[in-house]
Image (cartoon, grey):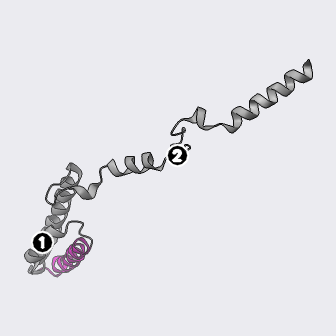
Amino acid sequence: MNVRAVALGLVASITVGLNLNAFAGANDFFGSNVGGNTESAQGSAALAPTATNAPPGDYTGDEKRMQKKFKANVKAARDLVAKAQKMIKNEDKKIATKGKILKEIGEKRLNELNANNPFPEIAGRENKKVQ
């Protein structure tokens, strides 16, 4: 009787172990496709919204914030160059030297901002102002 129960238990566990689809359903815990149905996996990916579908000119709050930050950085660099030019015109040699250094810093910063501009439509307007 003991041998019979053990054999029956082994057969039952092997049968259950081989038929994983009956217990896992269409998707298991990690989202892999156990049932072999590829349509459900492709359909969910096709329905997911993408950031590239946004119409041009409509910006998210984060993009608007970054545009403001970029414009503020450009304005600060331009103000620094303007302040440096006023300092260069000063009679005092020490202040004029500081002005030259500040002008180099401001111009370098403007060039970096224009080179790394994430907003191409702003770049055209900003470059026109620089020239």
Q: Callout 1: few (<14), some (14-19), or many (20+) C-alpha neighbours within 10 Å?
A: some
x and y percent of residue 47 in the render? 32, 48
Answer with the quarter of the image where residue 21 lies: top right
x and y percent of residue 31 in the render? 50, 43
Asked whether 55 or 46 is in front, the reply is: 46
Asked whether 29 or 25 is in front, the reply is: 25
Residue at 18 percent of width and 54 percent of height? 59
Is 71 drawn above or below residue 42 in the view shown?
Answer: below
Residue at 72 percent of width and 33 percent of height? 15
Residue at 44 percent of width and 48 percent of height? 41
Residue 59 on the magenta segment: no
Q: State left or right for residue 63 relative to residue 130.
A: right
Type of the residue with mark 1: Glu
Residue 101 on the magenta segment: yes
- The secondary structure type at the circle numbered 2 is loop
x and y percent of residue 16 in the render? 69, 32
**Labelled disc at residue 33:** 2
> In this picture, which residue range is highlighted in magenta?
92-115
Answer with the quarter of the image where residue 57 lies: bottom left
Q: Callout 2: few (<14), some (14-19), or many (20+) C-alpha neighbours within 10 Å?
A: some
Question: Which SS type dominates the magenta stretch?
Answer: helix
x and y percent of residue 96 in the render? 16, 80
Task: Give the residue pinned by disc 1.
Answer: 126
